């Protein structure tokens, strides 16, 4: 049985890992089409967020190691370096409205996390 969560649309999808490989409230990094993508699973839910792993403030690929939480109900990750917070849904920095990072569509199919690669390819 296929379980696909309606999140974002993409014409091409890459299977990255099983949803169980992402511990609740933690992040993992995956190389998708040559780009580092940080994947986050909140709580026991099966919804997964995908954002760029690149922290524009520290100029390091570290966001997958950030602290997951929420700010007034908005799911976010805090960079492990300087602690700027990024919205997991939109990529917008919650501490500096002039900064944002790319987000990527995700879905779960038969327990596997897939990332939409259309947006990734347009950034190559």
Image (spheres, grey):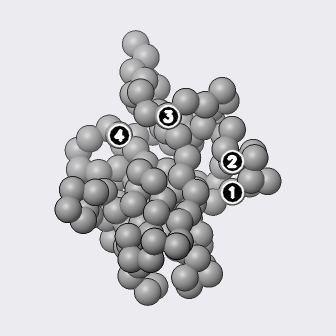
Residues packed near mark 1 inside 10 Å, few (<14), some (14 to 19) or many (20 plus): some
Which residue is pictured at 58% across the width and 76% down the height? 56
Can residue 29 be seen here? The reply is: no
Foreground: 49 or 1? 49
Question: Which of the marked residues, 4 or 3, is nearer the chain's N terminus?
Answer: 3
**Which residue in the protein does label 4 denote?**
47
x, y percent for residue 25: 29, 58
Asked if disc 1 and disc 2 are in contact, CB closer than 8 Å, the reply is yes
**Which residue in the protein does label 3 denote?**
8
Residues packed near mark 2 inside 10 Å, few (<14), some (14 to 19) or many (20 plus): many
Question: Which of the marked residues, 2 or 3, is nearer the chain's N terminus?
Answer: 3
Query: Closer to us: mark 2 or mark 4?
Result: 2
Query: Closer to us: mark 1 or mark 2?
Result: 2
Q: Measure the C-alpha gap from mark 1 to mark 3.
A: 19 Å
Task: State the mark number for residue 35.
Answer: 1
Seen in the picture, residue 37 relative to 84 is either above or below; the reply is above
Which residue is pictured at 41% across the width and 27% down the height? 6
Query: Closer to us: mark 1 or mark 3?
Result: 3
Asked if disc 2 and disc 4 are in contact, CB closer than 8 Å, the reply is no
Question: Which of the marked residues, 1 or 3, is nearer the chain's N terminus?
Answer: 3
Q: Quadrant of the N terminus?
A: top left
Question: Which of the marked residues, 1 or 2, is nearer the chain's N terminus?
Answer: 1
Assign a secondary structure to mark 1: strand
Q: Measure the C-alpha gap from mark 4 to mark 1.
A: 21 Å
Residues packed near mark 3 inside 10 Å, few (<14), some (14 to 19) or many (20 plus): few
């Amino acid at each position: 049985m296929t379980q696909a969560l309606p999140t974002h649309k993409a014409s091409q999808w890459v299977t990255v890992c099983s949803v169980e490989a992402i511990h609740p409230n933690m992040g993992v990094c995956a190389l998708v089409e040559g780009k580092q993508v940080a994947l986050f699973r909140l709580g026991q839910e099966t919804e997964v967020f995908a954002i760029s792993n690149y922290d524009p403030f520290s100029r390091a690929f570290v966001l997958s190691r950030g602290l997951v939480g929420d700010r007034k109900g908005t799911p976010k990750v805090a960079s492990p370096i300087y602690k700027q917070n990024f919205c997991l849904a939109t990529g917008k920095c919650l501490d500096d409205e002039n900064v944002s990072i790319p987000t990527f569509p995700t879905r779960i199919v038969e327990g596997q996390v897939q990332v939409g690669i259309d947006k990734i390819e347009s950034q190559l």
